[in-house]
Image (cartoon, grey):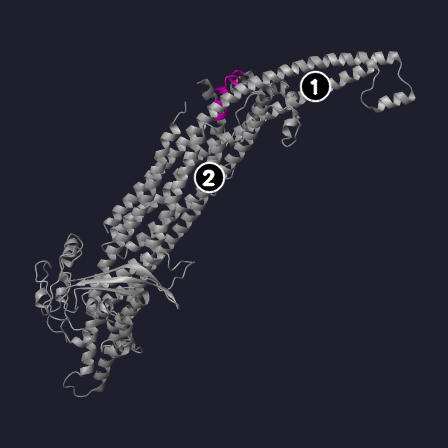
Amino acid sequence: AASAPKTLPSSGPKSLREMSHPLATSSSEEMGPALTPSPDLLLPRSIADKDLSLPNGTPVDTSSPASSSSLLNRLQLDDDLDVETRDLFVTVDDPKKHVCTMETYITYRVTTKTTRAEFDLPEYSVRRRYQDFDWLRNKLEESQPTHLIPPLPEKFVVKGVVDRFSEEFVETRRKALDKFLKRITDHPVLSFNEHFNVFLTAKDLNAYKKQGMALLSKVGESVKYVTGGYKLRIRPLEFAAIGDYLDTFSLKLGTIDRIAQRIIKEQLEYLVELREYGPVYSTWGGLEVELSEPLEGVSACIGNCCTALEELSEDMTEEFLPVLREYILYAESMKNVLKKRDQVQAEYEAKLEAVALKKEDRPKVPTDVEKCQDRVECFNADLKADMERWQNNKRQDFRQLLMGMADKNIQYYEKCLTAWESIIPLLQDKPE
Amino acid sequence: RAVESQIEGQCAPVDSLWRRYSEFELLRNYLSVTYPHIVVPPLPEKRADFVWHKLSADNMDPDFVERRRMGLENFLLRVASHPVLCQDKIFHSFLTQEGGWKEMVNETGFQLKADSRLKALNATFRVKNPDKRFTELKHYSDELQSVISHLLRVRARVADRLYGVYKVHGNYGRVFSEWSAIEKEMGDGLQSAGHHMDVYAASIDDILEEEEHYADQLKEYLFYAEALRAVCRKHELMQYDLEMAAQDLTSKKQQCEELATGTVRTFSLKGMTSKLFGQETPEQREAKIKVLEEQIQEGEEQLKSKNLEGRDFVKSAWADIERFKEQKNHDLKEALISYAVMQISMCKKGIQVWTNAKECFSKM
């Protein structure tokens, strides 16, 4: 059974909501890597106030402009965030192409800045490739089955002939990978995961990967959670509601994806016609004397509009669609977690029923049933907390995404407007 | 103005408009034949052409009928403002006389003057000394026709595609509305943004309606190019006739000379047969010479008047061509300006709608 809420011993970013996480201190085996108490960070306060030296006495470098404190200061200006103490910052950048005999691939630089005790050093810089991120995600799913793990961008490029090494593709991927790590960083539980730690710090990740099976934590026995065969009696209303919501949400996003694709297609067809249209004015201009300049002007103007339209379509393809698809994937993975939760509950209910039917003298509730109950309650709490976080992130993400879409369209029209306004004087000009 | 009120009186129901259209055609034919050196204003298209899919190709479609009515009105204004054509009596009676106008036109006998050769557009008449200016002008009118046709065709396709882009955005309206139903905080923002997407999708109808006016302006000059070509053609035929007449005169003179001097400079079957079967009597020869001399005199007078006619034609045609050129440059510049203004207006509307949508999104 869950104990009364104790003061939070964990270090790391905590919004005020997280303070009453009921199961943070219950049996540590359930929670994966232990939450190390750090008396310094019980209450949220500016990181600039506290002693930034780590337990082993190593001072944290705050002199560089990109240091934690100045980054935090920048963050504190953001209205959307509570005044949180952030002591972990992760960035993905600097994509580089590696050409080897067997294969060609891209690596990204993953930079970490932190004051957490779990990290030996305050800064790390490692290079990772997509399959490393994929490995991380799988590990997180295994070891944190009660939590929602953010999605990765698609592994394989399915549609059309897309160049895996084109600047645009690599940049889109980089942004998605950066977002992926930042979401994990922001998560009060996931960010303390040992696999995440190794991912951020290890020089040789492959060596660590090979030890994989041996290091599988007790909780990460996903086998237990995935065991089927238990039928769920009643799904609690709130989780049924989440399930329904996710179903409709995925559906609507799918529709939006199709509409956006259709618009891009129509825009490209419009572009094809415009590309023929502009030059005809130029041809005509060649026939004329007095009208030559005005007609050339119109031709050039249409050309500028073509360029602007091309940019709009490119932006929508590269920046809008991928984020949309990411959320569809996210919803899918969330539904899987919901299913797992159902399974855990079903197992508990079945075991409980089995005990009830035995009609034995029950001095106390058998331990394994108790364990199941714990698991259910744990799962439910984690999921609820994550859902709330997810809802908030989703709102922010879509706000940004849709505002971005509106912005791009505004920019497109502004470019065209400038082009047309600039030729009015040319058209009105009377040659002497 | 008297002219305009008359035009309004002729905005009759559809089937009488059709009859009227043929009367317009009759008027124009009359003017073309009577004033061959003038670039006669063209009529609007009889049938809907250069349509894009939303625009009706149906001749009875009210929008088409209305645009054609405006085109006919424009035609009359063009004639009325032409320094030469506006004085024509047949034109005046077209505007003022209700019944019997057709008969009046036919009584002028203008059909007799009409050169049927003009209808044969592709027939070539070899002109030995073509007037370079007219040749160039004919070439120009051909090129102009070609380029404006191309422009109108592509413009129609562009309009079609643009229509598609705008209309698909309407789907956002629906899906945002559906999505907002399951959201708490995001709901209002999504819903109102969706409304703006509907507005955006609907706005294209008016935009493209306005653009049709621009297309009509281009079409007028497409047909004007035809009128220009006709003037060049008439000159070409005139020149041809002149050269034929001169050639005929020269050969008659030569014949005359041969008969008079008895020398046969050129081989002729007649000459051979007369050599073989006996020559003509001096009296016969005298008679022939007399006939020829009469013909030569007639021919010389005709040639003189044809030359004069030709020079007059060139002079007045060229004056009208210069007038036409200025009109064309002015009108097309105005058309391009109005097109640019339309584009600017469309861009501003687009900015407005997306700015509104952005604001809604920001409230999510």
Query: Would residue A307 be found to the left or right of residue A335 on screen?
Result: right
Which residue ends up furthest to the bottom in the rendered image? A360
Say the numbered circle drawn on residue B246: 1
Chain letter of the residue beneath label 2 in the structure image: A
Q: Indicate the position of residue A18 as horizontal and vertical percent values.
A: 15, 64
Chain letter of the residue beneath label 1 in the structure image: B
Q: Indicate the position of residue B168 as horizontal and vertical percent values.
A: 39, 49
The quadrant in which residue A219 appears is bottom left
Residue depicted at 41% across the width and 43% down the height: B162
Q: Amino acid at mark 1?
A: Ala
Q: Indicate the position of residue B17 as horizontal and vertical percent values.
A: 52, 29
Q: Which of B3 and A272 lies nearest the eye of the viewer? A: A272
Query: Would residue A372 be found to the left or right of residue B69 on screen?
Result: left
Residue at label 2?
A279
Say the numbered circle drawn on residue A283: none
Rendered position, B311 above or below A207: above
What's drawn in magenta, residue-wise?
Answer: B74-87
Rendered position, B196 above or below A42: above
The quadrant in which residue A380 appears is bottom left
Q: CA distance from mark 2 to mark 1?
A: 47 Å
Residue A346 visible in the displayed image = yes
Element marked by disc 1:
helix
Element marked by disc 2:
helix
Q: Indicate the position of residue A268 as horizontal and vertical percent values.
A: 42, 48
Residue depicted at 9% across the width and 70% down the height: A6
